[in-house]
Image (cartoon, rainbow, N blue to C red):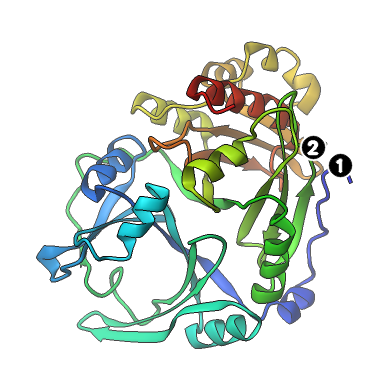
C-alpha cells in the first residue's frame, strides 16, 4: 500500500505473550574507527558527548583502544584495532568507519542467546561471564545484517562499563552537552530485495513486529526511490527501520551507501532531544553540518502540519523539518555524513506525541540528499 501503515499499540498481555526476548534498552553502539582518539574528540567537541571510560594499553588491553562516550541515555564506544591481525582491521578495510555492534541490554543473556539461536540466529559468541573487582559482566553475541552484530548484555551485577575499561569521572572540559537524550531508532540499509528477508528475520528470530511500512510511492523523487519497513521489539522500546533500494532513474542513497560501505550496515542513528531548536543550534555552532531544504518548504508549513509550538522562523533558520500523524507532531533534521565515505550520519528528532517517521518530509529530505550525492558524483 502507498500510505503509511502504523500498527495499533499492543495490549500489555499481547506484548508479554509475544515477547520471548524482552529488551530493556539499547546498551551501546560500538563504532569501529581508524583513529579512536581523534574520533572521540569530534564526538566530544562537536556533538557534546562526555568521555566516561577508556580501554587500551594503559588498562592492560593490548590489541585495541576503546573510548566510551555518553550523553543522556546514549552510549557510544569508539574502537580502533592496534595490531595488524585484529579482526576489526578487516572491518575497516571493507567498510571504513562504521557501526559494528548494536548492543542490547537484556535481563537474561543465556535465555536471549538460546531463544534467538534456536530460531535461526548465527551465534558469534556463546554466553560468557567475566568477574573482576567491579562485579560480574555477562554477554553473548549474534550476527544480523552484513557484518553488524547484536551483543546481549547483562550489567546488573557490574559497576562501570565493562571489564578492561577504566571509568573516567573527571570533568570533560572538551564536551559541551547539546541536550541529546536517547536513541530513538537505528536505521539499517540492506541490498536489493533483502528488506523482507531481514524483516522476517527480526520477526522470527527476535520476536519483533512490523511497526510501520513505506513503499517506493512514499519514498521517491524524480530520480531515486527506496522502500522501508520499521520493526519494533515487543515493548516497542526498540525500533529498527530497514531500507532497501527501489528502481529509479538514478542511484538512490541506499545504493550509494551499499557501494561505499561495501555491503549492508547501519546507515543512521536517530537521537532524541526534548528541545530540538536548542540542540541543533548548539550542534551547528560546534561544527556539525546538516542537510538543508529549500526555503519554500516553510511557506505553507503551518497549513500542512497545523499549529505547532515552535516559531517557524527558527525552524527555517536551522533547517528543521516538521511532520504530523494522528498522535501529534515531530521535528527532525539530518546531518551530512560524518565520515569521509558517504555512509554513516545522524538524525536529531523531537517527538511531540507523533509515533511516525516523517513521511511528509520524505520528498524534500531525499531531494536534499540527492543534491549532496550529485556534488559527490554519486547520483
Residue 231 at what x, y percent from top left?
69, 60
Which dot marks residue 3?
1
Residue 75 at what x, y percent from top left?
39, 56
Q: Which of marks 2 and 1 is nearer the N terminus?
A: 1
Q: Which residue is drawn at 89% across and 46% down?
A: 1
Q: In this view, does 90 lie above or below 356?
A: below
Are the two marked residues, 2 and 1, in contact with CB atoms closer than 8 angstroms?
yes
Quadrant in the picture for the C terminus = top right
Q: Residue at x 70, y 31 (%)?
A: 224
Q: Which residue is drawn at 82% across and 36% down?
A: 217
Q: Which quarter of the picture shows residue 352?
A: top right
Residue 327 vs residue 317: left or right?
right
Residue 56 vs residue 208: left or right?
left
Q: How far apart are marks 2 and 1 (CA)?
A: 7 Å
Residue 232 at what x, y percent from top left?
68, 62
Label 2 residue SS: loop
Looking at the picture, tell me which residue is in the foreground, 99 or 273: 99
Residue 184 at what x, y percent from top left?
57, 51
Which dot marks residue 218?
2
Label 1 residue SS: loop
Looking at the picture, tell me which residue is in the foreground, 106 or 90: 90
Amino acid at each position: 500500500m502507498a500510505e503509511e501503515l502504523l500498527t495499533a499499540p499492543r495490549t500489555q498481555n499481547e506484548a508479554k505473550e509475544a515477547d520471548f526476548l524482552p529488551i530493556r534498552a539499547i546498551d551501546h553502539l560500538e563504532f569501529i574507527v581508524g583513529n579512536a582518539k581523534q574520533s572521540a574528540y569530534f564526538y566530544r567537541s562537536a556533538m557534546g558527548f562526555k568521555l566516561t571510560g577508556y580501554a587500551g594499553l594503559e588498562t592492560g588491553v593490548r590489541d585495541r583502544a576503546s573510548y566510551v562516550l555518553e550523553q543522556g541515555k546514549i552510549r557510544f564506544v569508539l574502537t580502533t584495532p592496534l595490531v595488524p591481525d585484529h579482526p576489526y582491521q578487516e572491518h575497516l578495510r571493507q567498510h571504513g568507519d562504521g557501526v559494528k555492534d548494536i548492543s542490547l541490554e537484556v535481563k537474561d543473556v543465556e535465555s536471549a542467546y538460546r531463544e534467538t539461536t534456536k530460531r535461526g540466529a548465527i551465534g558469534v559468541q556463546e554466553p560468557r561471564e567475566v568477574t573482576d573487582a567491579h562485579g560480574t559482566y555477562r554477554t553473548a553475541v549474534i550476527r544480523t545484517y552484513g557484518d553488524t552484530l547484536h551483543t546481549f548484555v547483562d550489567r546488573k551485577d557490574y559497576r562501570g562499563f565493562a571489564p578492561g575499561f577504566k571509568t573516567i569521572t573527571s570533568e570533560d572540559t572538551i564536551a559541551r552537552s547539546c541536550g541529546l537524550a536517547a536513541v530513538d531508532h537505528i536505521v539499517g540499509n540492506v541490498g536489493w530485495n533483502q528488506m523482507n528477508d531481514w524483516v522476517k528475520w527480526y520477526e522470527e528470530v527476535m520476536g519483533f513486529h512490523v511497526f510501520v511500512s513505506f513503499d517506493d510511492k512514499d519514498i521517491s523523487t524524480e530520480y531515486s526511490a527506496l522502500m522501508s519497513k520499521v520493526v519494533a521489539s515487543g515493548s516497542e522500546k526498540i525500533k529498527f527501520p530497514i531500507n532497501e533500494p527501489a528502481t529509479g532513474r538514478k542511484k538512490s542513497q541506499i545504493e550509494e551507501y551499499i557501494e561505499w560501505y561495501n555491503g549492508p550496515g547501519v546507515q543512521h542513528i536517530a537521537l532524541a532531544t526534548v528541545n530540538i531548536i536548542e540542540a541543533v543550534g548548539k550542534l551547528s555552532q560546534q561544527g556539525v553540518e546538516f542537510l538543508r531544504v529549500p526555503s519554500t518548504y516553510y511557506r505553507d508549513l503551518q497549513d500542512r502540519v497545523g499549529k505547532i509550538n515552535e516559531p517557524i522562523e527558527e525552524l527555517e533558520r536551522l533547517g528543521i523539518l516538521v511532520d504530523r500523524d494522528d498522535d501529534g507532531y515531530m521535528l527532525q533534521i539530518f546531518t551530512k555524513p560524518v565520515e569521509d565515505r558517504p555512509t554513516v550520519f545522524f538524525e536529531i528528532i523531537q517527538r511531540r506525541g507523533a509515533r511516525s517517521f516523517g513521511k511528509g518530509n520524505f520528498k524534500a529530505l531525499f531531494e536534499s540528499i540527492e543534491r549532496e550525492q550529485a556534488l559527490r558524483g554519486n547520483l
